[in-house]
């Protein structure tokens, strides 16, 4: 279990490009993504250029003890509606146990803190039960299911739509801190 002081979300930079591409092209990451082909360096470079210029998105590198180990994206940021969509993954297979939960905790803190939004949305393949459970643990509720919504591996797959609201996050963050992080209180 990581310590809160050892974890941070840092803005994505051009210098992170090669690392993110290597992470994103891993089989274990691609298996849970809509876009699951191996991404070529030229395709990734175009995405990175657009991503860094996108005013309706914020991309973060998750670090543990200063070591980059994961990626977080906040996309379709709609301040007029108080919401955005997010996705995340651990890029390093040897990330400390509990890093995914730490990343989710920091992401919620950023969305409901500095970004000042009211709702965080995500879509998860129904077969990714571990991530669905993690989101439920953090107070996400299922808003629906897109049945036979996305073709993957030659079969139509269901997608679970989830959302977390800012209301109650202050209490939940206090409750979750000792469960997610080594220290007893935040």
Image: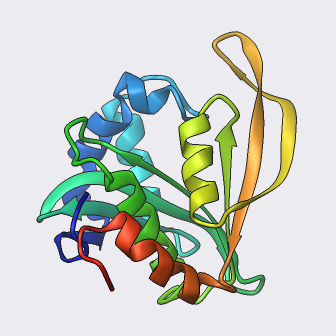
Could you say which quadrant of the image residue 178 lies in?
bottom left
Q: Position of residue 182 (x, y in %)?
A: 24, 68
**Residue at figure coordinates x 65%, y 28% from the top left:** 127
Q: Identify the image's colour scheme: rainbow, by chain, secondary structure or one colour.
A: rainbow
**Residue at figure coordinates x 51%, y 74% from the top left:** 108
Q: Position of residue 89 (x, y in %)?
A: 41, 46
Along the viewing direction, whichever of 45 and 35 lies nearer the viewer: 35
Q: What is the number of callouts on the image?
A: 0
In the rendered image, the residue lying farthest to the left is: 66
Q: Is residue 55 visible?
A: yes
User: Which quadrant holds the N terminus?
Assistant: bottom left
Q: Position of residue 96 (x, y in %)?
A: 22, 48
**Residue at figure coordinates x 30%, y 61% from the top left:** 61
In the rendered image, the residue lying farthest to the top is: 154
**Residue at figure coordinates x 37%, y 37% from the top left:** 24
Rendered position, 35 above or below 16? above
Q: Is residue 53 visible?
A: no
Along the viewing direction, whichever of 64 and 81 lies nearer the viewer: 64
Rendered position, 23 above or below 78? above
Could you say which quadrant of the image residue 150 lies in?
top right
């Amino acid at each position: 279990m990581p310590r809160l002081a050892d974890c941070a979300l840092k803005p994505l930079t051009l210098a992170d490009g090669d690392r993110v591409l290597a992470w994103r092209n891993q089989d274990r990451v691609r298996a849970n993504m809509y876009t699951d082909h191996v991404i070529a360096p030229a395709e990734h470079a175009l995405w990175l250029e657009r991503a860094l210029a996108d005013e309706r998105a914020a991309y973060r590198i998750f670090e543990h003890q200063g070591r980059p180990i994961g990626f977080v994206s906040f996309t379709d940021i709609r301040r007029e509606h108080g919401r955005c969509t997010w996705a995340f993954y651990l890029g390093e297979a040897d990330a400390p146990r509990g890093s995914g939960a730490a990343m989710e905790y920091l992401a919620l803190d950023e969305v409901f803190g500095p970004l000042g939004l009211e709702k965080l949305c995500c879509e998860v393949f129904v077969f990714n039960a571990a991530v669905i459970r993690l989101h439920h643990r953090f107070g996400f509720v299922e808003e629906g299911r897109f049945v036979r919504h996305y073709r993957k591996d030659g079969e139509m797959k269901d997608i679970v739509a989830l959302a977390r609201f800012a209301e109650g996050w202050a209490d939940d963050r206090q409750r979750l801190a000792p469960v997610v992080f080594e220290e007893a209180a935040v």
